[in-house]
Image (cartoon, rainbow, N blue to C red):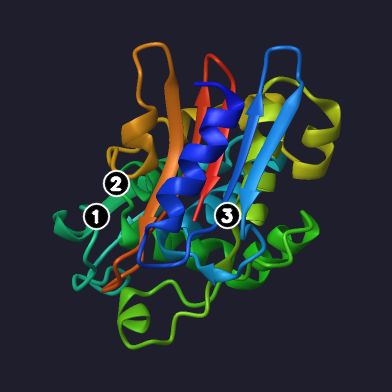
Amino acid sequence: MRLNDLKQTLQYFCDRLPFEVAYSLSICNQSGEKINICRNDDNVVSTASIRKLFIMIAVLQRADCNKSYLQHRIILNEDNVDKNEIYGLLQYLTYPASVTVYDLLTFMIALSDNVATKLLCDLIGLAEINECIHKLGLFQTHLGCPQISDKINGRDESTTSASDTNILLNLIVQGSLGDFSSISILKCSQTTCQLALTILSRQKSKVSSPFFLSTKKSVICHKTGFKLFQQCSNSLSTAIEPIFKLSII
């Protein structure tokens, strides 16, 4: 599809939806030339499960400073696992159970596991996660309480924008390709950025934009989230081979 056709198709589709759409799309070729297409990309919206993308980066920043950090073990028991969480599998394990930080990262992204998310938030702390986000210049993104009960009761204060998420995805992709500036800003090595993409490529949910992007020639690295009880969805996608970056909210 030509760029003009893509712009017109997106515009046509979004104009006919019963809710407001924001997106930020970056298309890069192998030589690094980039074209951006956006719509309402500075609109501040609920993160839904996209918050897990930002939590992952905060964890990986720690891991980049301490090579054994991802192998650090956490004991799961009745006291630190909320069995009322909607998404994930960790609440169904036999306790006590021992998992690594890397295990939690994988569960959080691949299965959108909310128990893993809360444990990682407790481990890192929301203050450090938000500091990490704001140091990256993502000022429209702020994470509040990660518990599902708070989201249901209307106390979810986590926000982001298509612009912020696209900036982060660009940093990860360019860092994975060895771009020094991106590595310096993200404070993650090229290897760590490549690990981030590997983890994102394992997400099992392929609905929304990943469903339409999936091809045999592409690896889709993404984090998809759905806002509870509303007819809208948030989705982030990054596809490599060819390099293609998409942030839609």
Question: First in sequence: mark 3 or mark 2?
Answer: 3
Q: Which residue is mark 1?
A: 88
Counting residues from the N terminus, which is met first, the one under dot 3 or under dot 1?
3
At numbered mark 2, what does the secondary structure look like: helix, strand or loop? loop
Along the line of sight, which residue is nearer the eye, 122 or 239?
Answer: 239
Taking the image as shown, residue 63 lies to the left or right of residue 210, namely right
- Amino acid tagged 2: Leu
Residue 50's spot in the image, x, y percent?
47, 56
Residue 211 found in image quarter: top left
- Residue 172 vs 150, above or below: the answer is above
Tag 3: residue type?
Answer: Phe
State if disc 1 and disc 2 touch (CB < 8 Å).
yes
Residue at 67 percent across and 17 percent down: it is 29
- Residue at point 74%, 66% (across, down): 139
161 relative to 173, above or below? below
- Spatial separation of the CA atoms under disc 3 and disc 1: 18 Å
Helix, strand or loop at label 1? It is: loop
Could you classify mark 3 by the number of other residues whose Cα lies within 10 Å: few (under 14), some (14-19), or many (20 or more)? many
- Tag count in the figure? 3
The residue that disc 2 covers is 111
Quarter-wise, where is residue 94 in the image?
A: bottom left
The residue carrying mark 3 is 54
Give the CA distance from mark 2 to mark 1: 6 Å
Residue 140's tag is none
Label 1 neighbour load within 10 Å: few <14, some 14-19, many 20+: some
Left/right placement of residue 183 relative to residue 95 reads: right
Residue drawn at the location 53% of the way across and 73% of the way down? 158
- Left or right, residue 4 beside residue 248: right
Q: Amino acid at mark 1?
A: Gly
- The CA distance from mark 3 to mark 2 is 16 Å
